[in-house]
Amino acid sequence: TAWFEWSSRLNLSRNRNKVLSLYKDQPLDNLGRGSNSVRVGEPMGIFYGFRSLGVDPSTGDIVFDDVNGDGIINADDRVKIGDPNPLLTGGMGNNLVYKQFELQVFLQFSYGNDIFNGSRMYTESLKGSDNQVSAVTTRWRQPGDISSIPRATESDPNNNNRISSRFVEDGSYLRLKNLSLSYSIENRLLEKMKLRSARVYLTGQNILTFTRYSGMDPEVNYAGADNLRLGTDFFTYPQSRTVSVGIQLGL
């Protein structure tokens, strides 16, 4: 028997979908907190809203793209602002054995999907009773300020917190999903202890996550397994990081 063994397995998944037809070509709009939409020619559940062009340094309000050029920002200016469907998902498992030691590592990833961070609509709103995140300390305060956070205003006449690309983020991630290190007691010691097998192990789940997403967990959807309300984070509790130690005995 080899004193060192290493085996790996890789799985990749690529799922494509496109809406071909709807009744009278009428889209299904404003689905859920992220304003998911079902529209002919697009994937299921795209994010549909206003395109944010940033904060106007002279007024402190968000500038929204006047798509049709009529000088008025209204529902006719809404466009596709994101896609929650990943380009590629997958995982990689590794199993390493050295003498009595065994290490199992599972990596999981998602690439090319967007997340609508609905939590930021409230925690960066600068109005109402919700606690605010530290990013609001960099908000626009006076003419000439350059900031990604608009001015503080209770009335918000410009509706700065409307559904827009301001809250759409890259949801790609790489996660160390599972890690397990174990040691199996040698046979000569098992005989002395009158045991058939004995193993000491340390395991962990959701150990590390590499992502540019600013929320608590990129592997998230507040609507669960819903196939229309996709990729939306709305004060969703993140997956727990757990670590456990144990002994497994065979009598």
Image (cartoon, rainbow, N blue to C red):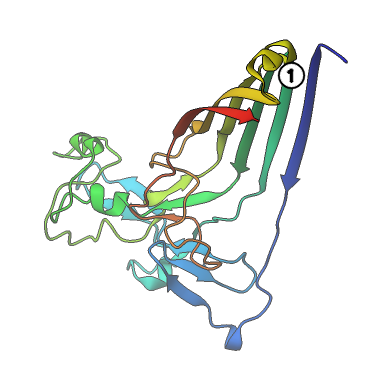
Q: Is residue 17 above or below residue 54?
A: below
**Position of residue 209 measured from the top left corner of the image (x, y, whole percent):** 50, 32
The answer to which quarter of the image holds residue 26 is: bottom right
Q: Quadrant of the C terminus?
A: top right
Quarter of the view holding residue 20: bottom right
Q: Is residue 118 left or right of residue 137?
A: right
Q: Is residue 209 visible from the viewing direction of this image?
A: no
Q: Secondary structure at mark 1?
A: strand
Q: Is residue 199 left or right of residue 158?
A: right
Give the answer, above or below, for where 83 lies relative to 218: below
> As drawn, which residue projects farthest toward the bottom?
24
x, y percent for residue 146: 26, 35
Q: Give how far across and how far down residue 242 sits, in percent.
A: 45, 34
According to the picture, the residue beneath numbered tag 1 turns out to be 97
Judge left or right: residue 231 versus residue 155. right
Q: Is residue 2 above or below residue 69?
A: above
Q: Nearer the viewer, residue 82 or 116?
A: 116
Q: How many marks?
A: 1
- Front residue of 234/144: it is 234
Question: Which residue is depicted at the point 21% across and 39% down?
Answer: 136
Residue in view at x 64 percent, y 23 percent: 198
Q: Quadrant of residue 10?
A: top right
Give the amino acid at mark 1: Val
CA neighbours of label 1 inside 10 A, class few (<14), some (14 to 19), many (20+)? some
Between residue 37 and residue 179, name the one nearer to us.
Answer: 179
- Please name the residue shown 62% across and 38% down the image: 108
Residue farthest to the right, as pictured: 1
Q: Is residue 83 visible?
A: yes
At a point 81% along the width and 11% down the height, the residue shown is: 3
